[in-house]
Amino acid sequence: MFPAILVLLASICLIASVVPLFPIAHGSVRSFDFGRLQAIAVSAIVILLALIVGAQSWVVLAAIVMACTAIAIQLPYVLRFTPIWQKQTARFEGDIGAASTISVLSCNVKQGNRDYQRVVDLVRERQPDIAVFMETDSAWAEALKPCLAEFRETVEQPQEDSYGMMLASRYPLRESTVRFLLNDEVPSISCVVELPGGKDMRIIVLHPEPPLPLRDTLGRDAEILLVAEEAQDEKLPLIVAGDLNDVAWSRTTRRFLRISGLFDPRQGRGLFNSFDARYWFIRWPLDHIFHSHQFELVKIERLPFVGSDHFPMYYRLALTDQDHNDAPADETADDNEEAEEAIKTEKSRDRPPAGTDWEE
């Protein structure tokens, strides 16, 4: 009986490792992108228990082979977010006092979370230059007013469907726009920020649709890839931030980085798993910040629990005149073609976004 359980667990891990290899933009496939860490952990446990039991039978040996295969498939995706990998974003080694820097606090507050004071206290404690909030309804917009009044400018788009969004800046905003890129209910924010010293940069904040098992993921994928195309043509230094409802190692996020030419400061440093903040055993990196080659990393930090299902993330980047970052990955022949196809398909559809009823 026990060997059969090992085979069952190893089989599940192997299937979970193979399914996301298929280039199918559907939640039933893409959802398997998320649990790579869990598949590795369970596979390792299977191997350990099999070795303790002894691999005398073919059943136990089969479990070991399947578990090892699952780990071999998963590790290349995860290892790039460990210190053994080449760092993509260089560490800033210059004079912080003389540099143009920007700190960003990104927080999906979870619309149904009413522990407002934790978020207010965190913003006041960390004093970010830019604070970004997702899933903000009218109650959250009202609760955040006292701390956001300490900022110079705010951009607000509260909504009651889990897609509300807010941005607050201590620096002047030369331009600020709430945009609905592909769906009339899914906003994004684009701002041009004037940094100390008069330098301008752009920040784009996203919170696309989550993947659902019974629905395709084109709404999410197309929005992410549309911003990648914008980033490719952007002349200003650029930061893209937010809860992308996609993990850092997914097919879509890797394509986003290749098309946009942006950098992920987590590569070579750590996973910084931001979701699910409530359960340690189902966590993955879901809240992102990507940047153009003009920036180097000063600090990256996952912040404490604030009552949401997401941990807030904090980044500080320095705008530099030199590019010490690792070279970004080159686009493949299919990247732009598949991005254009996803965007075209999603633009032609009129449907409500996924997940609007989760907080009801």
Image: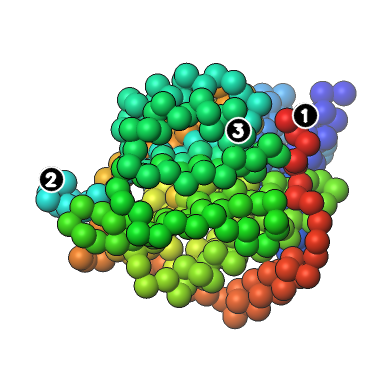
Mark 1, residue position: 360
Secondary-structure class at tag 2? helix
**Marking on residue 138:** 3
Q: Which mark is residue 97?
A: 2
The quarter of the picture where residue 296 lies is: bottom left
Q: Quadrant of the C terminus?
A: top right
Cα gap from disc 1 to disc 3, whole angstroms = 15 Å
Callout 1 crowding tier (Cα within 10 Å): few <14, some 14–19, many ≥20: few
Q: Position of residue 195 (x, y in %)?
A: 26, 54
What kind of residue is marked 3?
A: Ser
- Name the amino acid type tagged 2: Gly
In the displayed structure image, the side of residue 60 where residue 332 appears, left or right: left
Q: How far from the left and from the top, in percent, is residue 202?
A: 39, 60
- Asked whether 302 or 204 is in front, the reply is 204
299, above or below 205, in the image: above
- Can residue 13 be seen in the rendering of this structure? yes
Give percent across and percent down for residue 74.
Answer: 62, 49
Q: Is residue 63 visible?
A: no
Q: Amino acid at mark 1?
A: Glu
Colouring of the image: rainbow
The tag earlier along the polypeptide, 1 or 3, is 3
Compare residues 211 and 348 and report the one nearer the observer: 348
- Of the two numbered discs 3 and 2 in the rendering, the one whose residue sits closer to the viewer: 3
Number of residues whose C-alpha sits closer than 10 Å to that of mark 2, classed few (under 14), some (14–19) or many (20 or more): few
Q: Nearer the viewer, mark 1 or mark 3?
A: 3
SS under mark 3: helix
Q: Nearer the viewer, residue 268 or 188?
A: 188
